[in-house]
Amino acid sequence: MRPYELSLADAADAIRARRLSPVELVDSVLDRVGQVEPRLGAYATVGAEQARRAAREAEREAARGHFRGALHGIPMGLKDLIDVAGTATAAGSRVRAGHRAREDSTVAARLAAAGAILVGKTHTHEFAYGLTTPQTNNAWDRGRVAGGSSGGSAVAVAACAATFSLGTDTGGSIRVPAALNGVVGLKPTYGLVPRHGVTSLSWSLDHVGPIARTVEDAAMVLTALAGHDPRDPASLAAPAVDYRPGPETDLTGLRVGIPRTYYFDRLDAEVETAVRRAVGELEELGAELVEIDIPMTRYIQATLWGLVAPEATAYHERTLRTVPELYQADVRILLEAGGLMSAGDYLRAQRSRTLMREEWARVLETVDVIAAPTVPTTATGAGQATLTWSDGTTEGVADALVRLCAPANITGVPALSVPVGHDAAGLPIGMQLLGRPLGERVLLRVGHAYERSRPVRALAPVG
């Protein structure tokens, strides 16, 4: 196995045991970037020399027996919303041309302290306001969308052009591209991972989280990221936790909720088959399956957009007024539409969110996790605007991709997407596990148990 193909956990163990040097690993990943980047377009910028310099320093430290942390010498990508001192944070937009961060974001600083090495900034849909990431091609089929808005981060990991990456998730933007590219994506509990130094889309819905090739890898990254930061007003004062799951796969006593409503409506048949098969595997591992009803389903998407639209427009108010021509047309239209919403509309969306949180809390008192599809389809064709379901209804691609992810953003509960197979065209399918607030350890335990019992190939077939 070539170094760039190693999981984070395997690479970290090899570096600590001195079987692999950070220089070897970073050089291997950078070579891989050079090989696949012309076809995939995962990166907005690549800092090869800085990465090699950091790898040499990590190697010297390892030779002295000094390891910064669990991620020592591990190459990563960061979504181009995340500040790193002295580097560009363009957020995928001409509006930010020439912008350079003055200081590290909290998450970048924590990853550096844990020993991770930045390869480059990954592409995002402009200001994270979209579900396709048009600059980036799907890692499994270049004629299909990568998903968004963290498409570059997911494609980099799937193509082995980063050992792990960070994305942001406002309505599914970690989980959607993770599912469409066959990798693991974790949206943590709202406030668990600080957002200081991360460009906002919608402050009350934004989350930062890891994208990785395995559940164990995602857990290792979350351990480095989580913790209170007073510079983020929403940051939780949660205790430090090691999220890395143990080797056991026995799920006896665990109750898994299977939605009767919403999550299995308007769904590709192959997606439903793969997810229900994965749910059956959880039952074979000892879990008890419990049918549940998802509350307030008719209000989910309206509530999400009722929050996102005015908050995003408020963030962009000055530049939308002074340089509107610098925005891409699709994003500018959404921002202008947000400016037409009334205070009453926004307050009603907030009230709906409060009620939804209360109802979800009641559901989650009856089960430990909920298992459902991450998205209702595999990756659609680039430029495809709509989907037609078996009942004859038509749905916009963006609406379809956000539909099953939105509840976790509205309620703030953690959600983990894991790959559970492929459709007949070879495109990846994702299953989403949702849990109680601060229930990441349970989600990761379930996802890891599934992963160990039925491994799914996570490396994209990029030549």
Image (cartoon, rainbow, N blue to C red):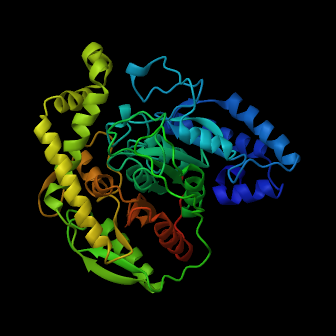
Residue visible at 48% across and 53% down in the picture: 237
On the question of residue 33 being in view, the answer is yes
Q: How many marks?
A: 0
Q: Quadrant of residue 360?
A: bottom left
The answer to whether residue 164 is above or below residue 374 is: above
Q: Is residue 30 left or right of residue 281?
A: right
Residue visible at 22% across and 66% down in the picture: 359
The answer to whether residue 235 is above or below residue 454 is: above
Q: Is residue 116 left or right of residue 232?
A: right
In percent of width and height, residue 87 lies at 57, 25
The answer to whether residue 353 is above or below residue 274 is: above
Residue visible at 31% across and 78% down in the picture: 366
Q: Is residue 366 left or right of residue 442?
A: left
On the question of residue 159 being in view, the answer is no
Quarter the N terminus occupies: bottom right
In percent of width and height, residue 212 lies at 54, 54
In percent of width and height, residue 90 lies at 46, 26
Q: Residue furthest right?
A: 64
Q: Residue furthest top?
A: 322
Closer-to-camera residue (83/432): 83
